[in-house]
Structures are given as structure tokens and as C-alpha cells.
Image (cartoon, rainbow, N blue to C red):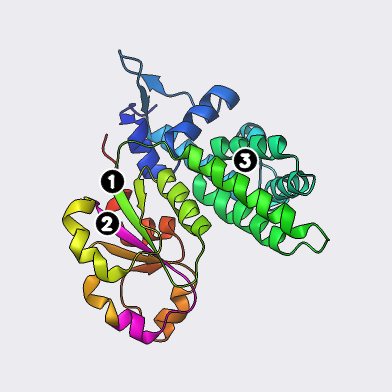
Amino acid sequence: MASEPKYPIREVSRLTGINPVTLRAWQRRYGLLKPARTDKGHRLYSEQDIALIRQILHWLEQGVSIGQVKGLLDNPAPVVDGSNWEQARSRLLESACRLNINRLESELLELASLYPAELLLRRVIEPWLVALGQLVRPDALLIEHSARALLTRTFYSLLTIRSGPRLALLRAGQLGELHSLLAQFELQGLECRSLDLGAADPAQLPLAADRLQVDGLVVLLGAGLGQGWFVQHQANWPSACFFVGELGLVYQQQGWLNRPFAVSVSEIARKYDATFGVVSN
């Protein structure tokens, strides 16, 4: 017996981590989902729909392209792990090396519309950025800088969310601006707005607490932070404060970091059931 449709699209986004734009694309372009509609035309999803979305996610995590998922839902078969992600990275790298900016932009927009932000960042964008930095050729810097500039412009254009929890982001240590942008993109995938504070001095946060009007603070951890920095700013952090970044593992092992921490913002939301994972309908 089919379960009753009762979940609006933003609630489904909160439960599954798939933003509404991607859910709509899976329905319109690939026929993967068939939600019911209210009298006003709003989508309503059932428990079965949510279970199906999680099956789709399973195949995507294995490296299956979204266009191949429908056939595998009906007839599961072994797949080459990660193949779709490798192909996506190769296409981006080829477009970047050819300085084909129009094609690179189209590929980035296509990927952003079809795949969850967390998967896209971990499996495609971050490894691609590493590959750009490892190019050994006379024009390597030109290729890397132009690709990063386009990625920045493209992802900024995608930060369009206007409702949901609002999180401030602050960079600490040696960390570039692009890290903030990627975190903002990932937060939007969690249906959250964001405010980039750049590399602001944490000591000034209490002075602006009433004016910022945010639901929490995400601190992006870079290199070069010592014990003194953590001790100095211990009293500056708001109650809803989360630390993010791989170097946090090092700072934790040193005993300097004793606040909620994870490698990514998505992991923070899962690990701590963080406030910013709650989406208003």
C-alpha cells in the first residue's frame, strides 16, 4: 500500500540533503520522482518517495551518473566505483586546460543542478582543484587561475537562497576566499543562507552580535593556528559555533579545540543535529 504524500519539498530537502532545485531536475529531466500535488500545485512527497531518493543517493555515491540511475533502480547491477566522478573531473580539467570558459561554465552549472552539493564538492570540485594545482606545464598558472576565477563567479551566481537559517562564516588561519565560497555553496545545499565575514578578527564578534542576526557561526580552520589563538578567543565564540576543516583533527589532537567540530559543514549537520539543519516550511 502506497504511503500518504505529506512532505513538502523543503522538508524533503532537510531529510535527504538534496536541495529543491535538484529534486525538481530529477523529476523533470529523468522521471525519477513522481510526487503528488496539492490543489495549489505544490509538490508533496511520501515516505516511499523519500526512500527512493535515498536509493538514488546510494547509486550516485557509487559513481553512477544521474542519467543511468533509473535503469539501475529497476535492475540493479555492479558498477565501476567512482566512474562518473572521474569522468566529470576529467571533463572539467580538459575544459580548463583548453581555456574553454564557456564549456567549463556549462559543465559546472550542469553538475550543480543535478548532484547534491556535498557529493559534488567531495567527489568532483575539490579533487579537480587539487589536479589544477598539480599541473606541470608552462601555462599551468594561467589555467589554474582562470578556472578558479570562473568557479568563483559561477558558484556565487548560484547562491540564491532567500529563506532558512542564516549562518555566518569566518576564516581562521591560512585559508583562501574560495574555501568560504565552497562552504556557502554546501550550506545552500542544506537550505541555509550564509553571511561571509571573511578573515575577521574573532575578538570583534561580541561587538557585532546583535547586528549580525545569525543563527550560528561556522569557523573554517586553516593552517598556522597555535594554542594561544584558541585560548585567546575562547570567550569570543557564540553558543551556536561550529568548527570545520581537516586541520581541526590536528588541533583536536593537540587538545586546543574543544568545540563542536567536523571536516565539512554537512558532517556538522549530521553529527550534531545542528540548528542550521532545520528548514522552515
Residue plotted at (80% across, 45% down): 98
Residue 64: % across, % down = 66, 43
- Which residue is most to the top? 39
Q: Which residue is mark 3?
A: 108
Q: Amino acid at mark 3?
A: Leu
Cβ atoms at labels 1 and 2 below 8 Å apart: yes
Residue 262: % across, % down = 41, 66
Q: Which comes sooner in the sequence, label 3 or label 2?
A: 3
> Which corner quadrant holds the C terminus?
top left
**Residue 159 makes an appearance in the image:** yes
- Which residue is most to the right? 138
Rate crowding at label 3 as few (under 14), some (14 to 19) or many (20 or more) other CA atoms within 10 Å: some
Q: Which comes sooner in the sequence, label 1 or label 2?
A: 1
Residue plotted at (57% across, 56% down): 122
Q: Is residue 6 left or right of residue 254?
A: left
Closer-to-camera residue (167/152): 152
Rate crowding at label 2 as few (under 14), some (14 to 19) or many (20 or more) other CA atoms within 10 Å: many
Q: Amino acid at mark 2?
A: Gly
Q: Which residue is mark 2?
A: 216
Magenta stretch encompasses residue 243: no
Dot 2 falls on a residue whose secondary structure is strand
Residue 239: % across, % down = 21, 65
Q: Which comes sooner in the sequence, label 3 or label 1?
A: 3
- Residue 165: assigned label: 1
Dot 1 falls on a residue whose secondary structure is loop
